[in-house]
Image (cartoon, coloured by chain):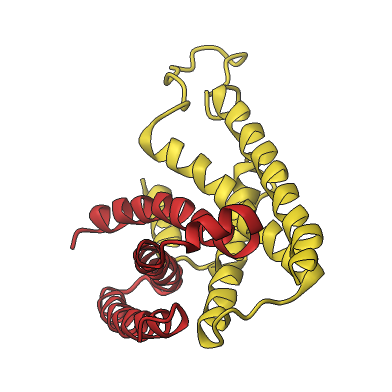
Amino acid sequence: MRESTIMFLHYVTAILIVITGLIHLLANNDPVIGATIKANPVLYLGNMAIFLAALLYHAFNGVRVILIEMVPDRCWTKWISWAILIVGIVTYAVGLQVLMVALGFA
Amino acid sequence: MEAESEFKEYYAKNMRGISGWFKARVYTIERWLYAAHRITGILIVLFVLAHFYSTGWHPGLWWDALLGIIVTFHTANGIRLILAELGFAVGKPLLIKKPSQRPVSIEGVQRYVVVFALVLFVVLAAIWAYYALVVQPMMG
């Protein structure tokens, strides 16, 4: 994927995190709005699945950008990008499992 | 020409490394915001990993308010960065002809966007602190 596409997705996920993260915060910290949100657990699980995906993409890409900036080398850039991608996918799979258990779906 | 290529090579190699983030003295305030954005970003990644490892883990009362400062700064400054990336409120480019003219990046609408981001940061951090210090202890 082109670097410009990766950074565009970085901004898209940033906006997604603000929206879904706000829902996550309200669900756990606001007694009134939180009850309304948690009344529909399927939608809340969907929110958390999007939140987790966006957050992991944004966080791991942020770390990747810092790492490839530290060592400006083509080979290092390639390997670190693949390593981060694999770690990110594995973390998302584990995270979804944890979410399902925590929200009572499994 | 020789000096220019040496200059480019120096920056391409990123010789300063992490200490280069804090070389902010000769730049505008955005340079400090950039350094703070990276540090808060790294801190958020550390919190998120701990939060994943033990679901629902939180640092606790006052530390939650500090976490709020870190997250809301990253959010407010991130909104400023998205606006700049998409070209909103950047200002018209100015061809400098006289010494009295200064680039729009130093004296333009960007200054107000920075102030907006910082005010937004304070407001969001205050709301977060209210929830962390007042609402959460009541919920138990």
Split into 4 quadrants, where in the image is the N terminus of chain B? top left
Above or below: residue B26 compared with residue B63: above
Above or below: residue B35 compared with residue B107: below
Which residue appears at 57% of the width and 83% of the height?
B50
Which chain wears yellow? B
The quadrant holding residue A76 is bottom left
Instruction: Give B76 or B54, whichever is nearer the viewer.
Output: B54
Instruction: Give B107 or B80, whichever is nearer the viewer.
Output: B80
Colour in which the image shows chain A: red
Residue A1 in sight in this render: yes
Instruction: Give A15 or B35, whichever is nearer the viewer.
Output: A15
Q: Position of residue B42 (x, y in %)?
A: 56, 70
Residue B20 in sight in this render: no
Q: Position of residue B113 (x, y in %)?
A: 58, 31
Split into 4 quadrants, where in the image is the C terminus of chain B? bottom right
> Quick one: which residue is furthest to the front in this view?
A39
The quadrant holding residue A31 is bottom right
